[in-house]
Image: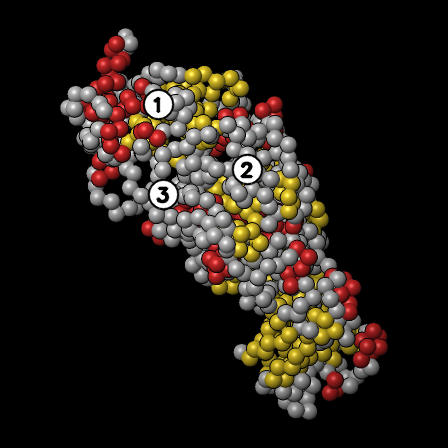
């Protein structure tokens, strides 16, 4: 067929912010992680189909393969206009250049003969692409779940995660693009005027005149499957939409279903509602197939078909390019043609060596644990109005191993509201016209980010399996066929389309425990872009298994980035915990555990940085407790001592994903290393309570060198510091350390309303400083003020940007929206939380528009991303969450 991250969630496990090891009271324990919330399926009709209308067919050859009058009328028109006097069909040597105006004259003459009283209007220029004014609005139906926040504030209910979205880079769930999702023409080096020269008529087997028709959404060319097109033939169409003619656009032969049926045909050619069409087929006229015809499918097709043998001329005629240019276009397996080089798209690579060769290591489902990836919002078959009476194919299922990426043919000028009618048109073309019994694709995605269920059984497929489609013979079994709606051979596909495709593939791969960075085990049959016998990657373009341009250079060149996004979303990041950080006289000892779901019981590396010194250690020590919780083997512990000089140093620990060479940060904390014969103070912050105009802090601390003698603790809230002596009764500390029972502290620090950093430090009386026991942010509110409430649903890398989404509101403001601040590294962006989130209203009853989404540009590298809900009274507010995100290099 002429023819896809995720929402990518990156999480890190952090231990308590104490300088002491896990001997301290209330030490953290190993816990298992939770799951994602699926987005709702849209079953209600998304448009009003209107009255069912018949499909139009226009014969181009008869049962013997001889051209009809319609098929050669365009050749005759051009030959007459060029002074030949008569046409000799495809054998004429006349050129098509410079005779477009004659077509208008002919049409005007026909109009006079038919009694037309007006001159036909003419509108020069190619079709202008329709630009949506807003993205899809999505209304989740799943009830929020309660998600505790890692702060001292009460846990808040977490509404269901909305599906993300057309990267034009766009924030996810609502799918409103931040740039026009309409594909734009890619510049070429073709000299001015050369496009008008078109093809020599002796290269043309079929050229119709422009033909007026009833409005249609999908066009195609079909023929008797027992015959075939001439070798090296090329098929072009152009259509009249909203008074403007499109340029000539090519459509390829569609070899989708395993059982081809009685009719062969081209890819579905989608339109924005066209009322005229012109067809050109380059090749040998004597070798045309039998029963060649143009098929035009309306927005709500009936099972009836009307044949038109003498189509009328439209009022508006094309003014340029009387014939299509048939210069060959070489296919590039990587999509790195001039088109893709000139496209403003992300081509960051991930596992590109495995993608190019298809010979990467096989990762079996048994060795992988499925990540928790939410189902994106999908318009079901009933939602787009399928006619199930024409769906005669009985679903069959197979193990899912790969995704095949497609695009359709067409003008890309459809509106958001027309997308459902286009899907109905493709369904009718496949199910009825081609006699496949159902639509070939498993899933379709429009340029606005709307996702449509395709073949029956796609959403009913059990985990790790997929209903067998009809999209890429001979690779229909074991694959998910997903198609972008439009032609991206010469234009840039909106990033939103690839994001939504990645969402679907990540969801299915996660359910099946499929590693997107591995190989599929499917062997290439050979094509113009990939040799036969190669082990295909998990995500590949249609052109890699068939002689087709699908999915276009632009999408093909971005598949490595899609593999990266799907891998990040559908594959769990490493999991771990730092149990203890113990400073000594000349080193820092760190211990904990870490593993990667995707490598099973195999150990992974952990990187421990103390100041600027990094030590790499393999997490292969015995930890039976980890195996009891996760069931992934008992040897995932680590312990390392990093030498360092006396002083206070930042200690950071990171679990490394062997596939990417990086991974989540498990923890960062400050530790103080003391000279010989001195030990660091030990302590812990138990509780922090922000209240009206103050912050209360409670914990314990002591100095091993001083025995039962108390030490000072410094508590800083913002710029206010309170010094308190740790001498309150704490018998539990004595039981644990045997150093006396009076080492507790409790202090209330007055502070103005707002959000402040609170830090606690245990002071060594000899050095006047000491280890920091912990830091956290707290928000203090004025009297009668309530804190903003919200949740960070997802954070993911999206090309050269970070996409975030979630919800937030201020109980004091009712339905009024508030701002959210998104910080990527040191750059802060302000976003209004005013997008539709009906699920938040169902839980909190504070209005339906409190969602937020943002795409913040970021350089390549790993960045900390933090999101804060802003109280408009104080100008600050609680932090909703922080996560690390890695942006790949282009």
- How crowded is the residue under tag 1: few (<14 C-alpha within 10 Å), some, or many (20+)? some
Tell me the SS state at disc 1: loop
Q: Are marks 3 and 1 in contact (CB under 8 Å)?
A: no
Q: Is residue 233 left or right of residue 724?
A: left
Q: Residue furthest bottom?
A: 677
Decide: is 880 above or below 481: below
Q: Are marks 2 and 1 in contact (CB under 8 Å)?
A: no
Q: Which mark is first along the chain, 1 or 2? A: 1
Q: Report the Cα–Cα distance between label 3 and label 2.
A: 29 Å
Q: Residue furthest left?
A: 83
Q: Report the Cα–Cα distance between label 2 and label 1.
A: 29 Å
Q: Which residue sits at x=26%, y=25%?
A: 89
Tell me the SS state at disc 2: loop
Front residue of 675 and 239: 239
Residue under label 2: 258
Q: Is residue 878 left or right of residue 237?
A: right
Q: Are marks 3 and 2 in contact (CB under 8 Å)?
A: no
Tell me the SS state at disc 3: loop
Question: Percent x, y for residue 258?
Answer: 55, 37
Q: Which residue sits at x=57%, y=53%?
A: 520
- How crowded is the residue under tag 2: few (<14 C-alpha within 10 Å), some, or many (20+)? some
Would residue 664 be visible to someone looking at this image?
A: yes
Front residue of 516 and 587: 516
Would residue 440 be visible to someone looking at this image?
A: no
Quarter where residue 629 is shown: bottom right
Q: Report the Cα–Cα distance between label 3 and label 1.
A: 33 Å
Question: Can you tell which of label 3 and label 2 is closer to the viewer?
Answer: 2
Front residue of 120 and 671: 120
Residue under label 1: 66
Residue under label 3: 490
């Amino acid at each position: 067929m002429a023819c896809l991250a995720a929402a990518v969630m990156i999480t890190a496990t952090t231990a308590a912010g104490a300088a002491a090891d896990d001997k301290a009271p209330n030490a953290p324990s190993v816990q298992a992680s939770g799951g994602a919330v699926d987005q709702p399926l849209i079953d209600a009709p998304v448009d009003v189909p209107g009255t069912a209308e018949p499909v139009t067919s226009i014969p181009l050859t008869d049962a013997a393969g001889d051209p009809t009058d319609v098929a050669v009328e365009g050749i005759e028109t051009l030959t007459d206009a060029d002074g030949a006097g008569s046409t000799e069909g495809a054998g004429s040597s006349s050129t098509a250049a410079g005779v477009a105006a004659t077509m208008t004259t002919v049409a005007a003459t026909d109009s006079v003969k038919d009694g037309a009283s007006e001159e036909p209007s003419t509108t020069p220029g190619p079709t202008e692409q329709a630009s949506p004014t807003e993205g899809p609005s999505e209304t989740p139906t799943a009830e929020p779940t309660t998600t505790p926040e890692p702060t001292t504030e009460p846990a808040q209910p977490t509404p269901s995660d909305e599906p993300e979205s057309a990267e034009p880079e766009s924030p996810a769930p609502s799918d409103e693009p931040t740039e026009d999702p309409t594909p734009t023409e890619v510049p070429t080096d073709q000299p001015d005027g050369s496009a008008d020269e078109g093809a020599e008529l002796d290269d043309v087997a079929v050229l119709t005149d422009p033909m007026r028709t009833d409005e249609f959404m999908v066009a195609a060319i079909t023929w008797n499957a027992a015959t075939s097109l001439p070798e090296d033939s090329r098929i072009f169409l152009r259509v009249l939409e909203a008074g403007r003619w499109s340029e000539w656009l090519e459509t390829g032969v569609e070899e989708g279903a395993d059982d081809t049926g009685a009719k062969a045909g081209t890819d579905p050619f989608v339109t924005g509602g066209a009322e005229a069409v012109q067809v050109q087929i380059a090749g040998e006229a004597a070798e045309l197939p039998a029963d060649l015809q143009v098929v035009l499918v309306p927005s709500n097709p009936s099972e009836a078909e009307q044949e038109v043998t003498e189509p009328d001329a439209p009022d508006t005629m094309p003014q340029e390019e009387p014939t299509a240019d048939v210069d060959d276009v070489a296919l590039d397996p990587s999509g790195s043609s001039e088109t893709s080089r000139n496209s403003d798209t992300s081509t960051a690579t991930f596992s590109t060596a495995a993608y190019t060769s298809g010979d990467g290591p096989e990762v079996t489902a048994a060795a992988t644990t499925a990540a928790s990836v939410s189902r994106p919002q999908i318009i079901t078959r009933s939602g787009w109005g399928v006619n199930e009476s024409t769906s005669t194919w009985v679903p069959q299922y197979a193990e899912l191993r790969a995704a095949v990426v497609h695009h359709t043919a067409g003008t890309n000028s459809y509106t958001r509201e027309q997308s459902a009618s286009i899907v109905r048109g493709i369904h009718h073309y496949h199910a009825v016209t081609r006699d496949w019994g159902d639509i070939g694709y498993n899933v379709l995605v429009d340029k606005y980010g709307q996702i449509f269920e395709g073949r029956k059984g796609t959403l009913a497929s059990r985990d790790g399996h997929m209903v067998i489609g009809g999209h890429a013979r001979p690779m229909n079994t074991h694959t998910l066929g997903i198609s972008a709606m439009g032609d991206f051979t010469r234009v840039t596909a909106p990033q939103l389309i690839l994001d939504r495709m990645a969402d679907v593939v990540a969801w299915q791969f996660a359910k099946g425990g499929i590693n997107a960075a591995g190989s599929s085990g499917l062997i290439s049959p050979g094509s113009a872009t990939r040799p036969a016998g190669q082990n295909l990657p998990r995500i590949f373009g249609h052109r890699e298994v068939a002689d087709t341009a699908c999915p276009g250079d632009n999408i093909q060149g971005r598949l490595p980035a899609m593999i990266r996004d799907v891998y990040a979303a559908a594959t769990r990041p490493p999991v771990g915990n730092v149990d203890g950080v113990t400073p000594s006289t000349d080193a820092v000892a760190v211990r904990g555990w870490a593993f990667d779901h995707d490598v099973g019981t195999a150990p992974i590396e952990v990187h421990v940085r103390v100041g600027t010194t990094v030590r790499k250690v393999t997490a292969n020590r015995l930890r039976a407790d980890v195996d009891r919780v996760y069931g992934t083997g008992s040897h995932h512990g680590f312990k390392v001592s990093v030498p360092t000089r006396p002083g206070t140093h930042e200690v950071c620990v990171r679990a490394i994903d062997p596939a990417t060479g990086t991974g989540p940060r498990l923890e960062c904390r400050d530790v103080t290393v003391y000279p010989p014969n001195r030990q660091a103070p030990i302590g812990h912050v138990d509780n922090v309570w922000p209240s009206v105009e103050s912050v209360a802090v409670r914990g314990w601390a002591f100095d091993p060198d001083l025995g039962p003698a108390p030490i000072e603790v410094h508590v800083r809230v913002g710029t206010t510091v309170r010094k308190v002596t740790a001498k309150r009764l704490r018998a539990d500390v004595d039981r644990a350390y045997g150093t006396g029972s009076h080492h507790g502290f409790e202090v209330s620090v007055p502070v103005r309303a707002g959000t402040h950093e609170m830090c606690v430090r245990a002071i060594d009386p000899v050095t006047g400083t000491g280890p920091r026991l912990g830091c956290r942010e707290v928000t203090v509110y004025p009297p009668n003020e309530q804190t903003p409430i919200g949740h960070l649903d997802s954070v993911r890398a999206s090309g050269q940007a970070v996409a975030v989404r979630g919800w937030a509101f201020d109980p004091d403001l009712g339905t009024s929206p508030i701002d959210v601040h998104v910080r990527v590294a040191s750059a802060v962006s302000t976003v209004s939380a005013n997008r539709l989130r009906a699920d938040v209203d169902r839980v909190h009853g504070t209005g339906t528009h409190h969602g937020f989404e943002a795409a913040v540009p970021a350089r390549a590298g790993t960045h900390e991303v933090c999101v804060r809900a802003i109280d408009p009274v104080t100008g600050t507010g609680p932090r909703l969450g922080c996560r690390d995100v890695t942006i790949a290099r282009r």
